[in-house]
Image (cartoon, coloured by chain):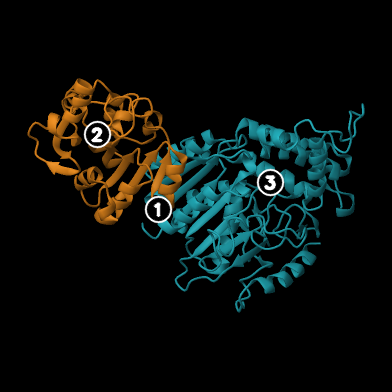
Chain colours: A cyan, B orange
Amino acid sequence: MRNVTFSIGRRIGDAMLAPVQDQRFGLGRTVRLADPVPLASGQSLAGVDIAYETYGTLAPDGSNAILICHALTGDQHVASPNPRTGKPGWWERLVGPGKPIDPARHFIICSNVLGGCSGTTGPGSADPAIGQPFAMRFPVITIADMVTVQARLLDHLGVERLQAVVGGSMGGMQALSWAAQFPERVRAVVAIASAARHSAQNIAFHEVGRQAIMADPRWASGNYTAEDAPAAGLAVARMAAHITYLSEQGLTERFGRRLQNRAALGFGFDAEFQVESYLRHQGLTFTERFDANSYLYITRAMDYFDLAAPHDGVLATAFAPAAAAGTRFALISFTSDWLYPTAETKRIVRALHGAGAATSYCELESPHGHDAFLLDAPEMNRIVTGFLNGLAEG
Amino acid sequence: MKSALRPDLQAVADAVPAGARVLDIGCGDGALLAHLRTSRQVSAHGIDVSAANVASAVARGLAVVQGDAHTDLSDWPDNAFDVAILSDTLQAMREPARILGELLRVARQGIVSFPNFGHWRVRAALAVGGRMPVTRTLPVSWHQTTNIHLCTINDFRALVDDCGLRIDRAAFLANGKLRSSFAANLLADQAVFVLCRP
């Protein structure tokens, strides 16, 4: 299934881009790493594939590279149609021609994360040792491992130092990790609707999702086939998670207590309310594009995320090398985001101030909850544009 | 850009050493910081309570954070800056004395500008007109103004004394022009003080 994805990706890619001479650049690309990747768990992973896309042209001095990091269920198709769903790129409001991150000016890189299911090595990939999918034999990975793999991708692309690394939600976690892991390789960090650690509530919601998957008999301890996947469990996981991406106000405004295709209560358990119907639809369509084991592994990576943990719990220490290297930070939170609330972003801001890093931060008004960063947000675009332009000012 | 700067901001800017690490508290849309970055090559940082202001300031490429000076200045360690600026903001603070203390904690030097409530026009408005003044430097009527702690130049000097701080130097303005310190409490409508630790 993966190979099919990529051939489609390439075909769409040719129409989107200026002529590409270097086969490393363009849409629907993939690279197999020559060397094994050491993981935070102490294990290592050999033969890692990275599925990625690039947009725009790398400047001769390499100064215009921007890495976009995707969220939990995102992929490398940040600004090109997703070959599997046919939907537009997931962040075309921020990335694309005439947008704050513009292939006319920037060399844009987006890769599927380690553990993912859009072409980068994950639990659904074949374990070279046995020729079967890893399934639950896949090592538990971390956000730091995802970043380590991205750094290998930059090596492959010949990008020494990023102008910026930009991400929302889990993408923001990767962006912050970049500053901690490779302070010399990143001039600026943009983390939107994100956090420097997973809270008890974040972990709790993820555990609900994982248990829903594992309770599905079709999960079969992870050894399912594509034809017989635990779709019901994965759909419930998505439904629970989707609620956390919205806000109470947003749900109320959009659905209220309105009924779906009926005038009165049915005294049964069909999707009688519009909100039920909506969630079921979200759950169902998600299973068509996402792998259950990947969901387990990536949510685990997020739960393990605590940038301060290796530094005796002092977040400022994690940022000190980046501050010393002159890395600049921009953080944005949204008023109605209760998944990664403003308080978590302010904790990051406090640590950055403690570390002496140049920091911009703004809490934007939005009724859309956590999902606000993916929606139309003119103020967010204005801030990102100004922040990136301001890098030139020093 | 330089010509567009308000006279009181220019007076504040004139007190900032070139290349300094500067924090502007209540920086608004970042006009002063942007000017300082261009004209004095400072490392420009700011904090403002308004999201719209912060968005504008960040859009200028400035390192500005959204926050409340009363609670969020504590985010910065001691001596994080060479200069901290409180430009036309002190009178809107809930606890001016504590803010002055914070100013001289996060920075070695503080620059404070404010409208002088001892100016003769203010006194006249009260004494003759019997009304709260609406003047060039206090353009908003009493019930709409965000100014909750207005003071005179002499009040400010006393506060600095009470806080155990020291006045390094001062500049006075009337009608947007610098003037001498003679009878400043009566004749200046704005004042700029450079403060340091004792």
Disc 3 target residue: A298
Are both tags, 2 and 1, on one chain?
Answer: yes
* Residue A133 against residue B52 in the figure, above or below: below
Distance of mark 3 from mark 2, alpha carbons?
Answer: 54 Å
Q: Nearer the viewer, residue B116 or B55?
A: B116
Q: Nearer the viewer, residue A393 or A123?
A: A393
Disc 2 target residue: B114
Q: Tell me the residue at 61%/34% (across/down).
A: A338
Quarter residue A300 falls in: top right
* Residue A349 against residue A394 in the figure, above or below: above
SS type, badge 1: loop
- Point out the residue furthest to the left here: B182
Report x, y in % for residue B19: 25, 52
Q: Is residue A177 visible?
A: no
Disc 1 target residue: B60
Q: Quadrant of the C terminus of chain A?
A: bottom left
Camera-near label (3 vs 1) is 1
Camera-near label (2 vs 1) is 2
Apparent side of residue A95 relative to residue A256 in the rendered image (left or right): left
Camera-near label (3 vs 2) is 2
Quarter residue A111 falls in: bottom right
Report x, y in % for residue B90: 29, 31
Quarter residue A120 falls in: bottom right
- Look at label 2 and name its amino acid: Phe
* Residue A81 against residue B166 in the figure, above or below: below
Are both tags, 3 and 2, on one chain?
Answer: no
Crowd tier of the residue under label 2, counting other residues whose Cα lies within 10 Å: few below 14, some 14–19, many 20 or above = many
Apparent side of residue A112 relative to residue B61 in the rendered image (left or right): right
Are both tags, 3 and 1, on one chain?
Answer: no
Crowd tier of the residue under label 1, counting other residues whose Cα lies within 10 Å: few below 14, some 14–19, many 20 or above = many
Q: Tell me the residue at 53%/52% (across/down).
A: A381
